[in-house]
Image (cartoon, rainbow, N blue to C red):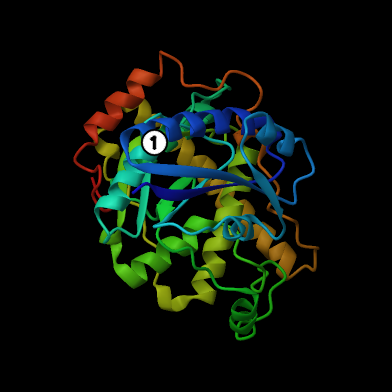
Amino acid sequence: MTQVIPMTVAARDEAASLGACLDSYLAAIAVTQQRLDVRVELLVVLDDTSDGSPGVCASRGVPSRRSSGGKLAAQLAGVRPGPFQLFGDADVLVEPETIAAMCELMLDDPSVAVAFPDKLPLPPRRSTLLARALHAYNRTRGYSSERAWFSGKLFAIRELSVPGVAELARRAATLPASRFHDYAAPLRIDDIYLSRRVTHDHGREAMRETAGIVWFRAPETWPGMYRYYRRMRRELERIDRLFPELGDRAVRIPDRLAAAPIGERALYRVFTTALAACKLAYRIDQLATDHLGLAPRDSWPAIVETKLGPARTEPTERTEPTARTERTARTARTERPWRS
């Protein structure tokens, strides 16, 4: 009997990248339905969208609906009956076999709570030293053999369960007041909370990496790097305080750095210097907001430089063999929990 697999793409003003993204998803869905006895039903949930995203969906025959309240609210609005849910970002590209590998694992092994593919950055559009350093860092996972959490860019999950407004308000009421951290606000980054919840409830072995690749645009400038860092760290700190029972976040150690080429090790030093500047700016930002009375800034707008954009965004012939070689070298990690 053909099983129906719901897939939800949460999008907010993503018209510039949504078309290429949906094209790659539709191609991967076609491969999945040829390989497995399933039907993947793709839905785009438009989170407070005001651009031309509905037309992009309609031009590709992909249904869409509207939502309000952020990414997690959009994902919840897309949940439908099925053995598990697929969720994807609206500004990525996937290799054709990626969704099939995720579905196959989830259907074959009921002990797996979350399945996710590897992610690799697209070639940088800038040629600066920092752009090259950020690309090398993201391409190698920070030279670490262990992930701190699964990638929220594309994942399959058996149950999407997140705390509601009432629970967040109750927990926030027990914490010291902060202008910098809005503790009662809805959760904003899916993979941070969900990774901790799944690990707490089922253990790390319940999260598995599969074959396939998600291509994404990494930040290439210091402002882009800082906005990304600020957004992630604020959510990490907030979840640390709201849900201490879920445990401390994992620390990624660059244990593969010593084996990297000398040029990449030099680029890593460029990255760590820029990261130190991000940490200092974050501390100043927090002090200025909490102690000097400055109005908190909205840190959640899209980081424009990480979007695919209208130009050609597919991996080129020059970069594709590199990615495939790296993936082959990591075969020992594929479909294993977290470690290589």
Q: Is residue 87 above or below residue 125?
A: below
On the question of residue 255 being in view, the answer is yes
Q: Name the residue that disc number 1 marks.
A: 33
Q: Is residue 280 left or right of residue 268?
A: right
The quadrant of the rendering that contains the C terminus is top left
Percent from the top left, x then y, of residue 144?
Answer: 32, 45
Residue furthest out toward the top:
317
Q: Which residue occupies the foreground of this view, 291 or 140?
A: 140
Dividing the picture into quadrants, the one containing residue 323 is top left
Q: Which residue occupies the foreground of this view, 56 or 257?
A: 56
Q: Is residue 106 left or right of residue 19?
A: left
Q: Amino acid at mark 1?
A: Gln
Label 1, secondary structure: give it.
helix
- Residue under the image location 55 percent in, 73 percent down: 163
- Number of callouts in the render? 1
Percent from the top left, x then y, of residue 83?
Answer: 39, 57
- Residue under the image location 58 percent in, 60 percent down: 76
Percent from the top left, x then y, of residue 195?
Answer: 41, 61
Dividing the picture into quadrants, the one containing residue 61 is top right
Q: Is residue 67 left or right of residue 312?
A: right
